[in-house]
Image (spheres, rainbow, N blue to C red):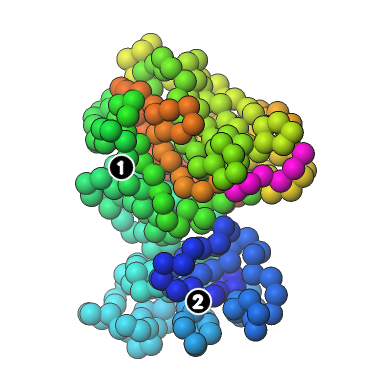
Amino acid sequence: MKALKFIKTGRPTLEGTVLKGNTLMDVEGVAIGPTSTTGWYAPPSAHNGYTIGQAGYRMGAKFWCPANDAEVIQFCNTTASPSPATPIITIDDALMFLQESGYMVTYNNTTLRSTTSLEGFPAKLPMDGLSCYLDAQIEQSSGTANRWFDISGNGLEFIKQGGTGLSLANLGGYQGFQFNDSGYFQCNDLYNSVNIGGDCTIVMWVWCTSILSRDTIFEKAGNGGASYQCSVAITWETNEGFSYYSRKTPAYDYASTVACDTNGGEGAWTMMAIKMSTGLTSTARTGFYSKNGANFAASYVSRSTTALDRGKQIRVGTGYAGPVEGPNGIGAVLTYNKMLSNAEIADVWNATKGKFGL
């Protein structure tokens, strides 16, 4: 477990942190300096097994180290506040209860997210560094009108925007949100937990028939410049491939991927992934893409020699080049605050491909 800090409700979070309730956890080394001036509390020494942590107003931070599943369940039933409405019996229920009660939980120093118990959550999906997971086929993510909820455990909420909101549709026999050249989703809160400015990976499951006009499918809104001059902007090009952009001085960086599958214009699902090294220094940024779980291929032209300005709100389905046209669609979005390895992107592919008939 990393350092913890109490944060009042409604206060902005820091990029490189994760929020549960009022407890903020450092995940990328932002907690630097003594507790007396920063408010950050150091965790116990790294160890194998569980660590449970929570920060509170005027109480600092508390940490518990249960030795096994049984002790986690016992903690829920005897120590946690508030206590469960009914006694906890299983470890899955215990982890779900702790997440919903604002506790941070790690196991072998990796953050646990109890949402793996959701019906339809992919088994063996890589969780380390997962900062956002939107899935059109999981009810807890897409089943509420005008909302697309993050089920990574970080609590992001994407709200429908645009003239005509996006609707769930049957795309090749599998559920996804169909674009319409108008609607899109935007996350206005907690977006700092998705650190696209640092080492990162973005994975999207997209339904493609053909792209007739160049549109933006994913971006972090501009901050002191256009989105493609800040953290990242990804466009869907008329060759059905993606282009992606970042940083701005003296010129923006750019890169491209191979084309998404189209099944001859009838439509097909493709998993496209992009990963980049940190753009928060003057060092040249690097970028790679992967299609359908294949090994990452280098694809990036770094022209900027200055650290980027971090983007703000996250948008899915629109951006600086305009909203994506129908009948193309999107089924899932996953972001990681790390550069996934070839083995990890293959694991993402294997964990999710069955959801889209592949």
Query: Mark 1 near mark 2, Cβ–Cβ under 8 Å?
Result: no
- How far from the left and from the top, in percent, is residue 297? 64, 29
Residue 156 located within the stretch drawn in magenta: no
Amino acid found under the numbered disc labelled 1: Lys
Q: Is residue 74 left or right of residue 17?
A: left
* Rendered residue at 32%/40% (across/down): 161
Residue situated in front as seen by the camera: 161 or 18: 161
- Can you identify the residue that label 2 sits on? 6
- Can you identify the residue that label 1 sits on? 160
- How far from the left and from the top, in percent, is residue 350? 45, 39
Q: What predominant SS class does the magenta segment belong to? A: loop
Residue situated in front as seen by the camera: 100 or 86: 100
User: What segment carries the magenta color?
Assistant: 305-310
As helix, strand or loop, the secondary structure at mark 1 comes to: strand
Image position of 210 with respect to 47: above or below: above
Which quadrant would the N terminus be assigned to in this image?
Answer: bottom right
Which quadrant would the C terminus be assigned to in this image?
Answer: top left
